[in-house]
Image (tube, rainbow, N blue to C red):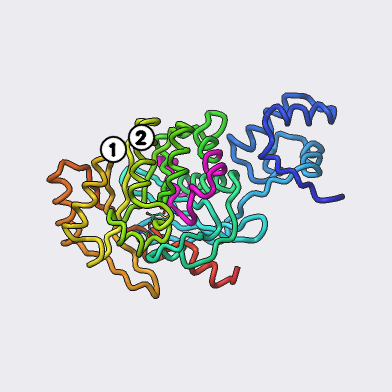
């Protein structure tokens, strides 16, 4: 028997109905299988226990599922859980479960590696390998959801595309995965609970507006001064802050949603009052919420976190201008699960 090459998760319900009809089986089987895949998030055909063994064998001989497998699980003192997953072709990615207050957040990856090479980010040090398929993005949510229920007795409340990779360079798969996560046919989570974070790819931000997406957009700004942003985010040379302002304005006009601005606090680099003023100017163009993010140190990287005092001064300056500002402390630092620390070690250890 040759190995099947069609991934069953690329099939629509109608295609599955046709498949069953062609194989002399009842049409309702298609709905049953479809629900196993998308509602009950089965990651093997043998999990589909109310489907006869013969039918499961029929499915196995025609389709693959290419599901993620949990590879490692690490628990932090602060209850954050980092998981690494093995993809069907052997590559490893990471996702994180972050419980905080009444929130259960899953932080998921969109690519294997990353080619943005942001100077402060550990993921930026590893090479880009490939985009994740939409069902691989979906599996991370399904597995982290199961972990949340098992370990803490609560389902996920939020999903953030802030793991490895740049979601806007894997546009179709990111949109399709978000659609699945929020579809009533599947996990049925509110799109307002999903946030996609981007380094700021102007053309794709415009596209998100044209597609009138219903999830939230976070922009990793980190400096509102072009010369400084160029130094830490090479992509800024491809589209400047001015291009970003226009793209985000368009996104806001189309979706009416508020933008989250992420700003990692780098000591002596982007944390002065001049920097805060530039940030405030940038944010005048659309409604925003600013997250000031504690910097997580990365090996062989010269940047340091600004520390509580400088961060507080920065926050107060923005708040005096009536801006909405949150200070985000790091989670899961002891297990390298914090922002920008993903995958480095595992990928190097296994030389993938
Ligand atoms: N490529 C996307 C999503 C992945 S990174 C993006 O750029 O938004 C998720 C967030 O973590 C980004 O805001 C990123 O700039 C930030 N980040 C990266 N390294 C970090 C570090 N060491 N400490 C704190 N935040 C970091």
Q: Of all residues shown, which one is farthest toward the bottom?
A: 300
Query: What is the number of the mark on residue 278?
Result: none
- Distance of label 1 from label 2 (alpha carbons): 7 Å
Residue 232 left/right relative to 342:
left
Q: Is residue 20 above or below residue 88?
A: above
Q: Quadrant of residue 128?
A: bottom right
Give the mark nearer the N terminus: 1 vs 2.
2
Camera-nearest residue between 266 and 140: 266
Q: Residues within 10 Å of mark 1 (few under 14, many from 20)?
A: some
Secondary structure state at the residue bearing disc 2: helix
- Where residue 314 sits in the image (x, y, percent)? 18, 55
Q: Is residue 62 above or below residue 33?
A: below
Q: Residue at x 45, y 63 (%)?
A: 117
- Where residue 206 sits in the image (x, y, percent)? 44, 39
Secondary structure state at the residue bearing disc 1: loop
> In the image, is residue 152 part of the stretch drawn in magenta?
yes
Residue indicated by mark 1: 286
Marks 1 and 2 in Cβ contact (< 8 Å): yes
Residue 292 left/right relative to 97:
left
Query: What is the number of the mark on residue 252?
Result: 2
Q: Is residue 239 above or below residue 156?
A: below
> In the image, is residue 115 part of the stretch drawn in magenta?
no
Magenta region: 150-176
Q: Quadrant of residue 257?
A: top left
- Where residue 300 sits in the image (x, y, percent)? 39, 75
Q: Residue at x 69, y 35 (%)?
A: 11
Q: Residue at x 37, y 72 (%)?
A: 301
Q: Is residue 190 visible?
A: no
Quarter of the picture containing the C terminus is bottom right
Q: Residue at x 54, y 58 (%)?
A: 93
- Where residue 192 sits in the image (x, y, percent)? 40, 35
């Amino acid at each position: 028997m040759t190995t099947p090459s069609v991934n069953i998760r690329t099939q629509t319900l109608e295609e599955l109905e046709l498949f069953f009809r062609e194989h002399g089986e009842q049409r309702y089987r298609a709905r049953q299988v479809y629900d196993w895949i998308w509602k009950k998030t089965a990651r093997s055909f043998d999990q589909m226990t109310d489907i006869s063994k013969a039918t499961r064998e029929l499915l196995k001989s025609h389709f693959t599922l290419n599901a993620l497998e949990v590879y490692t699980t690490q628990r932090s003192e602060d209850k954050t859980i980092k998981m690494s997953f093995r993809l069907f072709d052997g590559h490893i990615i990471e996702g994180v479960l972050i419980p905080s207050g009444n929130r259960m957040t899953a932080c998921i990856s969109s690519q294997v590696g990353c080619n943005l090479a942001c100077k402060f980010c550990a993921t930026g040090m590893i090479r880009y390998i490939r985009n994740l398929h939409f069902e691989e993005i979906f599996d991370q949510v399904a597995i982290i959801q199961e972990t949340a229920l098992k370990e803490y007795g609560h389902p996920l409340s939020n999903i953030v595309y802030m793991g490895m990779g740049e979601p806007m360079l894997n546009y179709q798969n990111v949109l399709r995965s978000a659609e699945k996560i929020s579809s009533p046919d599947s996990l049925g989570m509110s799109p307002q609970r999903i946030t996609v974070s981007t380094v700021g790819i102007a053309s794709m931000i415009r596209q998100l507006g044209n597609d009138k997406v219903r999830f939230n957009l976070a922009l990793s700004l980190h400096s509102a001064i072009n010369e400084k942003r160029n130094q830490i985010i090479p992509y800024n040379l491809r589209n400047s802050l001015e291009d970003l302002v226009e793209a985000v304005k368009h996104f806001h006009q189309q979706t009416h949603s508020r933008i989250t601005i992420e700003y990692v606090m780098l000591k002596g680099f982007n944390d002065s009052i001049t920097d805060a003023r530039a940030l405030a100017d940038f944010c005048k163009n659309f409604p925003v919420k600013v997250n000031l993010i504690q910097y997580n140190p990365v090996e062989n990287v010269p940047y340091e976190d600004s520390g509580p005092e400088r961060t507080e001064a920065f926050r107060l300056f923005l708040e005096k201008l009536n801006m909405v500002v949150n200070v985000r402390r790091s989670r899961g630092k002891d297990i390298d699960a914090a922002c920008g620390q993903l995958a480095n070690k595992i990928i190097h250890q296994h030389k993938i």
